[in-house]
Image (spheres, rainbow, N blue to C red):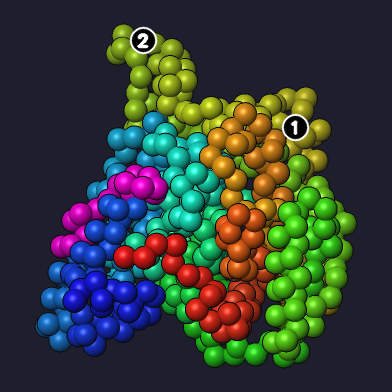
Amino acid sequence: MLRNIMESMEFAHQIAAAVQAGETTAESVVTEALRRAQLVQDEHNAFITIIDTAIEQAKAVDAKRAAGETLGKLAGVPVVIKDNICTKGVLTTAASKILSNFVPPYTATVVERLELADAIVIAKANLDEFGMGSGNENSAFGPASNAWDTSRVAGGSSGGSAVAVATGVAPIALGTDTGGSVRQPAAYNGIIGFKPTYGRLSRFGVIAYASSLDQVGVMARSSEDIALAMDVMAGHDPQDSTSVVDDVPAFSAALDDASLKGMKIGLIEELCGDGNSEATVAAIEKTKAQLTELGAEVVNVSLPNIRYAISSYYLIAPAEASSNLARYDGMIYGNRQGEDSLGQAESMMLTRGEGFGPEVKRRILTGSYALSAGYYDAYYGKALKVRRLIADDFAKAFEDVDIMLTPTAPSPAFKIGEKTDDPLASYLIDIDTVAANLVGIGGMSVPAGKAEDDMPCGIQILAPVMKDERLIQVARALENAAGNDFSPLAKTW
């Protein structure tokens, strides 16, 4: 009986409505979610921690209803949190050996707001160490594998979160997106990945990688669930100085207008041609046709400086990482290596040498070099100027179009280990997504069917600053057009 109930409630809005109406209990929903989580963990290594005590939180939600109290918008909904987002009393590692025993004394604002809405955190998801990677292969806890094919990567860095949603463990998962780390794994696993405008969601409690680029993002299989999560989480947070103070739109209101009549959508020429697989180009053409049928006008736009986005990003992000990760020295918290008799310098070197993985070390070294005396102006300073030029290109283009369109990634998920020995090839996977972080605009990956080897493919839509609700509107329209084929589950239960 329970399994039939769960199979009929794949989405967060369905679960919340059923729990609020007393048609099911939060306890039964979470029990099933934890069962699925263990099955997925055994097959995909999607999680670092599965939180069995979530059952007690579910019972508390049921007790609130029994007492006649009003339940939150996400009552009884299981959620998965990327393991670089702090959760009080629950291990939070950022998938790094150096934080393998770190239990935060506080909870990130975005998680706190989900819990205030009666959502229940059931697991902490696997990721690339400190968010540095495009395949979820750089985790100290081993790689997560794709929801559709265990021989392929889950995507990075929020791969575990994407797998959790794609396999039906939880209808909503949080990730972080520094250069595409929510959108790209969403595309690889056939789900929606949404990165709002920089500052729209609080970063308080998020373990920093590159502070001017990091943003919390949401993964789900329906536009309604994305909107519901944003309605709950968005809003100014005085604990985050980069949190915007603008009025928060009613994201769910964007669901009411599924018509795209009169909307002008710009196809970014520089990202839609050479370098993409045939199936990715076909997905772009298919999406263009769908958008036209839905009433939108699709035109080509040119962003001349976007070709430099990947180079700019891979100077700015490592430079900020080298500063942010300097705090991990084993002196105050985290793992400390070596005997107590070692001096401070020796202990710090040993701790970092053994605690950081190869990719994290590579980016710290790159960033430290770019910031060093004699090279700052030539590298980091120049990258910031290019960032400004890219932002100007976007601002000019958005004067003429409402939304922009690109692939999310040049091809579907690659094989695990395929790019391990070629970091540059791995970095180029981010070519479509990094610009949104450099500029600070909202971006969303939406499913666009299957590509090579019957693997999921995603299309990216981009909106101007603080116009994130447009992305939900477009996603809703495409979702309605595709029906049940929009974002199918990768697993059946």
Q: Residues within 10 Å of mark 1 (few under 14, many from 20)?
A: some
Q: Residue at x 64, y 56 (%)?
A: 452
Quick one: label 1 or label 2, which is nearer the N terminus? 2
Q: Residue at x 36, y 65 (%)?
A: 492
Image spot of residue 428 (x, y percent): 70, 44
Q: Residue furthest front?
A: 453
Q: Is residue 335 magenta?
A: no
Give whichever of 17, 207 is nearer the camera: 17
473 shown above or below 257: above
158 shown above or below 128: below
Q: Is residue 47 magenta?
A: yes
Residue 124 seen in this snapshot: no
Q: Residues within 10 Å of mark 2 (few under 14, many from 20)?
A: few
Image spot of residue 178 (x, y percent): 58, 51
Residue 293 seen in this snapshot: yes
Could you tell me the amino acid type at mark 2? Answer: Leu
Q: How far apart are labels 1 and 2 at the CA level?
A: 34 Å
Question: Would you name the residue on which mark 1 appears?
Answer: 376
Res. 398 mark: none
Question: Would you name the residue on which mark 2 appears?
Answer: 342
Q: Residue at x 73, y 54 (%)?
A: 277
Could you tell me the amino acid type at mark 1? Answer: Tyr
Q: Are marks 1 and 2 in contact (CB under 8 Å)?
A: no
SS class of the residue under badge 1? loop
SS class of the residue under badge 2? loop
Image spot of residue 430 (x, y percent): 67, 49
Left or right of residue 81: residue 88:
left
Report the span colored magenta: 41-56
